[in-house]
């Protein structure tokens, strides 16, 4: 007689499969992730080209993790987030760790200090998939102050191996998502018009572009590489930007521009 082997993760995966297209799918998915890599929290977001991401599911035992999600992130700060940039870039489906895709100066950015650090998150891995055209889904696993431990190398590797399974599950469950939601956001134009309307400050397209890259956490060198100019030229752009806005620091730039990213 064959004795059953311990298969808690496989058994939980079977529960996820049974719930595809129905109620309880997200909860079963979370239970499966807990058996595999033990995240402290989970959020599932649908990004489209226009408008804020749609929250499909969120759960955390640490209230602070999502305490500013609606008031700050969904209100416009998402445009500064590295994971939103993955949607804009249409990266291949797969697992992406935040520290691997974030700009080189992300941890020194005002976005990180003013928003991200307040969430208590210490690590994130997101599964990116495309259930329908022009919609990218982020199934984001986080580690926060609950454990205060980043994902281990083994857990990161496991997520990479599980990515095709997660992609298939998500594509099957969310195939009914709607893609259309108006025209694509032009963030630089939005900033230029907003700043001129609210403060009477006129920026050039290049100055607005530099401002966004600064806020997203790109260093002078990284901005130069993105724009195809020298670091010295970037410093000139930054100096012109600060002078035009009448500010002297990134903190002031963040305070000035963040409200203009609000999508209403």
Image (cartoon, rainbow, N blue to C red):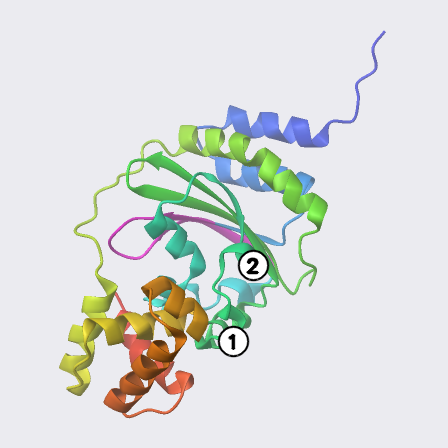
Residue 249 image-quadrant placement = bottom left
Label ID, residue 99: 2
Residue positioned 17% across, 52% down in the render? 183
Q: Which residue is mark 1?
A: 108
Q: Position of residue 101 (x, y in %)?
A: 49, 56
Camera-nearest residue between 182 and 58: 182
Residue positioned 44% across, 46% down in the render? 138
Residue 147 image-quadrant placement = bottom right
Vertical comparison of 242 with 97: above or below: below
Q: How many marks?
A: 2
Q: Position of residue 2 (x, y in %)?
A: 83, 10
The magenta segment: 44-61
Residue 203 image-quadrant placement = bottom left
Residue positioned 51% across, 66% down in the render? 104
Q: Callout 1 environment at 10 Å: few (<14), some (14 to 19), or many (20+)?
A: some
Most common SS among magenta residues = strand
In this rendering, position of residue 168 left or right of residue 12: left
Disc 2 versus disc 1: distance between alpha carbons? 13 Å
If you read the primary sequence from the N terminus, does the residue marked by circle 2 or circle 1 appear first?
A: 2
For residue 149: magenta? no
Q: Secondary structure at mark 2?
A: helix
In this rendering, position of residue 202 left or right of residue 207: left
Q: Position of residue 15 (x, y in %)?
A: 58, 28
């Amino acid at each position: 007689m064959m004795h059953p082997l311990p298969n808690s993760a496989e058994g939980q995966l079977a529960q996820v499969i049974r719930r595809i297209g129905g109620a309880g799918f997200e909860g079963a998915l979370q239970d499966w992730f807990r058996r595999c890599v033990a995240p402290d929290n989970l959020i599932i977001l649908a990004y489209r080209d226009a408008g804020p991401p749609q929250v499909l599911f969120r759960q955390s035992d640490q209230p602070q993790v999502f305490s500013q999600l609606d008031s700050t992130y969904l209100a416009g700060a998402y445009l500064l987030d590295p994971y939103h940039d993955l949607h804009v870039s249409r990266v291949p489906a797969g697992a992406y760790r935040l520290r691997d895709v974030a700009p080189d100066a992300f941890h020194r950015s005002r976005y990180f200090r003013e928003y991200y650090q307040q969430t208590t998150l210490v690590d994130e891995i997101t599964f990116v998939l495309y259930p329908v055209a022009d919609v990218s889904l982020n199934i984001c696993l986080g580690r926060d102050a609950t454990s205060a431990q980043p994902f281990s190398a083994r857990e990161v590797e496991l997520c990479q191996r599980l990515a095709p399974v997660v992609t298939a599950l998500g594509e099957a469950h969310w195939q009914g998502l709607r893609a259309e939601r108006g025209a694509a956001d032009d963030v630089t134009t939005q900033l230029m018009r907003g700043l001129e309307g609210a403060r009477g400050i006129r920026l050039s397209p290049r100055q607005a572009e530099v401002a966004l890259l600064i806020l997203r956490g790109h260093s002078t060198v990284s901005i130069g590489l993105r724009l195809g100019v020298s670091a010295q030229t970037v410093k000139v752009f930054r100096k012109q930007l600060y002078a035009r806005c009448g500010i002297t620091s990134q903190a002031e730039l963040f305070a000035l521009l963040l409200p203009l990213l609000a999508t209403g």
